[in-house]
Amino acid sequence: MEANKTYPDPSAIREELVQKYPAKVAKKRTKSIIINDPEAVPEVQANVRTVPGIITQRGCSYAGCKGVVLGPTRDIVNITHGPIGCSFYSWLTRRNQTKPETDADANFITYCFSTDMQEENIVFGGEKKLKVAIQEAYDLFHPKSIAIFSTCPVGLIGDDVHAAAREMKEKLGDCNVFGFSCEGYRGVSQSAGHHIANNGVFKHMVGRNNEKKEGKFRLNLLGEYNIGGDAFEIERIFKKCGITLVSSFSGNSTVGQLENAHMADLNVIMCHRSINYMGEMMETKYGIPWMKINFVGAESSAKSLRRIAQYFGDEELKARVEEVIAEELPKVKAVIDEIRPRTEGKTAMLFVGGSRAHHYQDLFTELGMTTVAAGYEFAHRDDYEGREVLPGIKIDADSKNIEELKVEADPELYKPRKSEAELEALKAEGLEINGYEGMMKQMMKKSMVVDDISHYESEKLIEIYKPDIFCAGIKEKYVVQKMGVPLKQLHSYDYGGPYTGFEGAVNFYRDIDRMVNNPVWKLIKAPWETAAAEMDGALEATYTEA
Amino acid sequence: MLLRHTTSEVKEREGLTINPAKTCQPIGAMYAALGIHGCLPHSHGSQGCCAYHRSTLTRHYKEPVMAATSSFTEGASVFGGQANLLAAIDTIFSVYDPDIIAVHSTCLSETIGDDLQQITRKALDDGKIPEGKYVIYASTPSFIGSHVTGYANMVAGMAAQFAVSTGEKKDQVNLVAGWMEPSDMRELKRISKEMGAKVVLFPDTSDVLDAPQTGKHVFYPKGGVTVPELKSTGDSKFTLALGCISAEPAAIALDKKCSVPFETVDMPIGLSATDRFIMALSKAAGVKVPDSITAERGRLVDVMTDMEQYFHGKKVALFGDPDQLIPLTEFLLDLGMKPRHIVSGTPGGRFDKRMKEILERAPGANFKNGLNADMFLLHQWIKNEPVDLLIGNTYGKYIARDEDIPFVRFGFPILDRIGHSYFPSVGYSGGLRIVEKILGVLMDRQDMTAKEEKFELVM
């Protein structure tokens, strides 16, 4: 495939993408299809209801809560309260890797727990069955924590999972039991579930253990879910730099780590969309500042490490970070030099997630590839345009239904890690504290930004731009590949990874090189379909003795 | 250990299902609807259902799985989903232009009491369904039965809503496919053709979920049973339902609506069940069994006799769906193997009865289906009485690795291997494939673990 050196005119494309929709739908979709200008970022309609029937990438609140945020913690028993499906589909499918320290440590990630609600539970209520299930889980496994996740019917029939959880917590004594009202219909996408999960983890887990662990530079890694081992690579780099990871939220994490997270001195945020609430709430309650970082991309990883060192303001740490970068980057650079001639000038599209469509652009840039169009599946305006738009975002009926916790400074545990003056000084040095500038400022002028892209729109965009690679998820994977365009899954990484840090960057470069230059894409047409095959000539014997 | 908390002590559970051997109705309905040509399945519920079902089917087939959703939010859940479904129908016909939308419900829409029949009628009255297009529906509440039930309900729905009795009988037999792979459906059509039997097979996902790579995405691939074919099922002289749980409800629907007589046979998996199917088809279609089919059978029996020593007395644990487990267990017994532990999350007294009859040949075997018949229980049984072979869907790999058991993937979903959509497991050649797969893992095990002095060249 040849790289597209010139790009189509985006204004005409916008029209074309909505042409086939009923008028009302077209009007609504137009507000989510934006031509980018990084200098004057235009408003993107985001986090609004998906039009029924449109074929969306989006999932539900339960998926965001149980699947994304709570799923990766290994020693918690996550019971899905509902009919069997929801627990089944979220069973091991997100590739959250975890590594218990010993063979004796608890690990429930490979298990699926459900109350398997039946018709009688829908009619007469399911609380009783839920309490029995909690008791049975406790008797069998004696976990430190049991979390309950509500599926759609639970909220409708009025089961009070929180009351059931409180009752069982008291009854069991040594097991922390809590519930989540993350019914699939709440909000407009997975995003609602992230928020609900943040609230629950903050309320029921964080702050339960005030023990101050060793380590000079202690931080939490927020919004990193250890898909394909991403968190392992970041852990490796932190360790090398002498940075102590108190807890990750929540890749490769344990209940104990989450309960102790408030003793860290900094929160660094990978996926802003799914976990920014936690950063904000911990800042308010405990005085821990948060900082957006990105360990996707070698340069971005180096930059993130420097930011962390700058925050702690320790010369020794700064020097150590530079040493680590100097050791790691040349290895990465060598691979880029080898691969880049084969990827330079090619184009990519990313329609995925709530942060990945932004982060992965850095890796493509390192390969000399251009992102011509991108968008999120479930992000909000601040993830596109930057957090400065937050005060202007209208709260609609769907967002109103998601609880906003009232958080106040903890009378005992609130301790500002940095004084106002220190924070101001850091900001003056260019360090963005408690901020995120969003995706669009980094994207080129006239690139396309589409929120909650539909199947129809993505197929049109591919026809028009003919990108060399398309990044999305499993539902889109084979649709796009049937069009002759390789699709990189950025939820599951096509079962590869890790893609974070320095080693992850190398993995990604190699995978993209393999995908965009794979000989199989040239073999799609049969020889008799391509050449004016000479198939009708007479068959003559060669060795006939005539 | 991957399943380190599973112990051998079996305790009765009433509330908690652990590692289910089933999933919910709507995914079965979605799969069945993909077996109609030009059909877009539609999930009437919140977005997550549709996303989960599409993801699981896509992982199983490595193929596009197109389906739409009513995208319920809290408002729809309170006020009813009619407006969402009507809007969806409008959007779908404008943008994706299917011939048919096949709507299935979810636990959400069932709990609030949405009536799909009433809403689809309203769509018709409001002129939202273009001329010559159809919207069909099936009620598939997730809190009843399993994914198999949902499949059965959608297949019954397509029969009931399309079949027409014109009064003029056709010389054709309806073949209702139980939940099986596109490869199996293709094989059933081949066998019927070989026998000279004229059949209408439905649903038919061959050439839909095994579509070729052409560089072009065909939204509605060329396969699938067509509307004229479905309509004609009402005039067929007989219906053969392949599977008492997943196929029979459609046969009953055809009998009720169009007085088409029917017989239910097991899904033709393995020797004996295939024998019964061939005889039933021969009788229903009024055709003789050709020598070519007898030869196919002979090849399977030949391998069974040639290799009997490797099967004999081997203990097997299996899990999966009723219409597969019934004939598969019988086949294992025909091979001289010993089924020891079997679970299926799908409930059903008839299933239970059939299994118990078959297992009379396997004294002391454990069998449980329905509530709490899950893979955790199966694993506990295995810990109490170890087996030589495990057969089931991909989730079995965790047990297989922990307990070091040779593992054959069979059933739904298979998320980590290919083959099921291309190579059939039904019919005599399907039997050969099953035998080959079982022998492969058992003999590989022998090769890898035999002492050097006991290592065999010829086996």
Image (cartoon, rainbow, N blue to C red):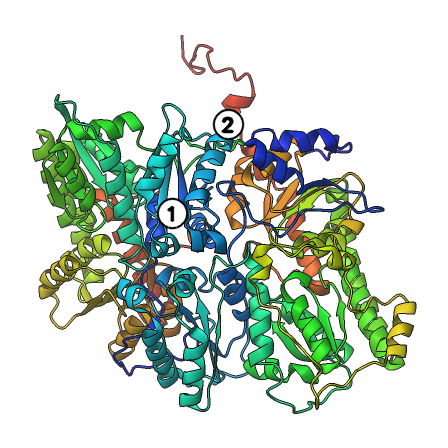
The residue to which callout 2 is attached is A526
Residue at x 16% of width, y 70% of height? B365
The residue to which callout 1 is attached is B419
Left of A383 or right of it: where is A483? left
Which quadrant would the N terminus of chain A be assigned to in this image?
top right
Task: For mark 2, give the secondary structure.
Answer: loop
Task: For mark 1, give the secondary structure.
Answer: loop
Residue at x 56% of width, y 20% of height? A531
Q: Is residue A444 above or below residue B2?
A: above
Are circles 2 and 1 on residues that touch, CB within 8 Å?
Answer: no
Say what amino acid the circle numbered 2 marks.
Answer: Ala
Residue B452 picture quarter: bottom left
> What's the mark number on residue A473?
none
Residue A164 picture quarter: bottom left
Q: Residue furthest top?
A: A546
Left of B55 or right of it: where is B442? left
Q: Are marks 2 and 1 on the same chain?
A: no
